[in-house]
Image: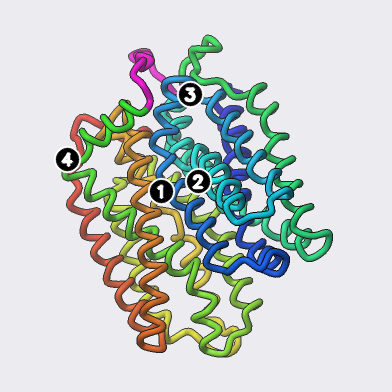
Amino acid sequence: MHRAWWVALVCFVALIGAAGFRSTPSLFIDPLQDEFGWSRGTISGAVSINVLLYGLTAPFASALMERYGIRRVVSCALLLISAGSGLTVFMTSAWQLILCWGVLVGLGSGSMALAFAATVTNRWFVQRRGLVTGVLTAGGAAGQLVFLPLIAVLVGGPGWRTASLIVSGAALAVVPLVMWLLRDRPEDVGLRPYGAGDDYVTPEVSTTGAARRTLGALNSAVRTRVFWLLAGTFAICGASTNGLIGVHFVPAAHDHGMAIPTAASLLAVIGVFDIIGTIASGWFTDRYDPRRLLATYYALRGVSLLFLPMLFTDDLQPPMLFFIVFYGLDWVATVPPTIALCREHFGADGAIVFGWVLASHQIGAAIVAFLAGLARDTFGTYDIVWIASGALCATAALMALVIRRRPEVTIAA
């Protein structure tokens, strides 16, 4: 087996951990409020900082990986997560919560965001890049599926401190695996990337400072139309997934009489089918035009959101199950073709540019999460939110279609 597949396996494990570690604070809100008397606004503020740093750290982390190596950056990120989660058991003030959850865990998980997957794929694979990207992206969904049920049991039993220590220990346990199996480049072990032909040329290692290269890549990218199209479509992706369904699906279903545990279980089902859909999307990206794939994904997502208000009932009906399965398949299927287009248009800086595009995803999610709640307070219903989001997805589909291809680049089969 080519060493690239072992590197991808370690990357998958790290991404599972990063997703699981980042999502656990939502389970601690009630226990912390009961024990310390902190307001939900204070606790949510720490989580918001976590989400913000998760998005903004990604492009800088990609540059750091180029400058100092993947192993060092990922190991440091895991140590930050371990420290941030472990130190929470000693906190007594709200600022310590913000420091541990918001800053340390946010920086650590952001350093292992999807831009990390893009960096590994670009370095270690020439063929099957789309498939590998899809598998690694699915690691994010798998992380929530693996960790959240276990953490929920621990919070309800031994308590949130035990859960925090287990998260800390799990992050620490991955570090030896990273140091043992992960390598920065194929050339470090005398290999070429998987699928590299005789004409493959080893890229030069950048010696530019991480901050300078990250901001330089952004400065160059913002001068191109394709960057704004990709950032805009991905912002709509975040708005229609994490910001909308991820935050407001459960309360919207509860508005129509559905039990909260039932609605929450439906979100877990979305996570299951997300894994299938993302891997399939990676396979398609190796074979078809990524622009057309993006347009198809956004168009179908928009149509499904327009029908959603008619599917809410006080009990679970087959049409709602169909929506959940369909939306799960489409959840982050947009990631592999978006990474492929970043790589195609921005070359060696593709992973860093994707980090900035990922930041727009988080910004879109944050904006819609707030506006959807405001709309619910104003109109007493979420109906206008679903319609507006469907229109946004239609706009994203059109934006994807106007992205121009670079004729000299072909997709590896």
Task: Name the residue located 61 percent from the left edge and 34 percent from the top edge.
Answer: 9
Label 1 vs label 4, nearer the camera: 4
Disc on the earlier residue, 3 or 4: 3
Determine which residue is flagged by label 1: 335
Q: Earlier in the sequence, mark 1 or mark 4?
A: 4
- The Cα–Cα distance between marks 2 and 1, rounded to whole angstroms, is 7 Å
Residue hosting label 4? 224
Residue type at numbered disc 2: Thr
Q: Is residue 280 left or right of residue 344?
A: right
Frontmost of labels 3 and 4 is 4
Q: Which residue is mark 2?
A: 137
- Residue at which label 3 appears: 194
Three-letter amino acid code at disc 4?
A: Thr
| Circle 3 or circle 2, nearest the eye | 2
> Which corner quadrant holds the N terminus?
top right
Local crowd at mark 4 within 10 Å, few (<14), some, or many (≥20)? few
Mark 1 secondary-structure assignment: helix
Identify the amino acid type marked 1: Val
